[in-house]
Amino acid sequence: MVKWLDMPPVWLAGFVALAWWQKTAFPRGSFGPVWADLLGGMLVGGGVILAALAIFEMRRHRTTVIPHRHADRLVTTGIFKRTRNPIYLGDTMILAGLILYWDAVLALPLVPIFVWVIERRFVVPEEARLRRAFAVAFARYARETRRWV
């Protein structure tokens, strides 16, 4: 059970809840009228699309999307040509977009904190497993493709 709680969507939900709490309990400042709503909506939509493209690509290659499991294949096609972590990037975009949309100004520091947590809890261990399983191929992939953007 604890293993299932230590999953990126759970962490994202926790950070989103913190942003919502800040917005409702301590409404301070504003990002501005229309542009923050528009940019926030675009970030949330783009994040969802990015994560969906990554999940589709991983399913197409018949490998797991569960972070703590061993990958059967190294996926380097599709959206993975642009970023090694499109799902985590999508999660970050969703969090940033909701913060902008909700005008949760004080919650903005949650974005880099979320990236730090995700990188330490998931990205670094995943890449270590991929490096062990697909040594040469992963080294080439890591040289050619950035971790985030």
Image (spheres, rainbow, N blue to C red):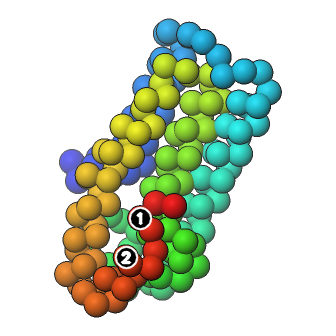
- Give the side of residue 126 with respect to residue 77, left or right: left
Residue found at the very far front of the displayed protein: 143
Secondary structure under badge 2?
helix
Residue 126 appears in the figure? yes
Vertical comparison of 102 with 90: above or below = above
Direction bottom: furthest residue: 136
Residue 43 at x, y percent in the picture: 65, 45
Q: Position of residue 69 (x, y in %)?
A: 27, 70
Q: Which mark is residue 142?
A: 2
**Quarter where residue 104 is shown:** top right
User: What amino acid is at disc 1?
Assistant: Arg
Q: Secondary structure at mark 1?
A: loop
Q: Are circles 2 and 1 on residues that touch, CB within 8 Å?
A: yes
Name the spot of residue 53 as percent of width and height, x first.
60, 68
**Residue 121 placed where, x, y %?**
26, 52
On screen, residue 9 above or below 101: below
Image point 24% across, 79% down: which residue?
A: 131
Q: CA distance from mark 2 to mark 1?
A: 7 Å
Q: Residue at x 21, y 48 (%)?
A: 2
Few, some or many residues within 10 Å of mark 1 (<14, 14–19, 20+): some
In the picture of the structure, the residue carrying the numbered disc 1 is 147
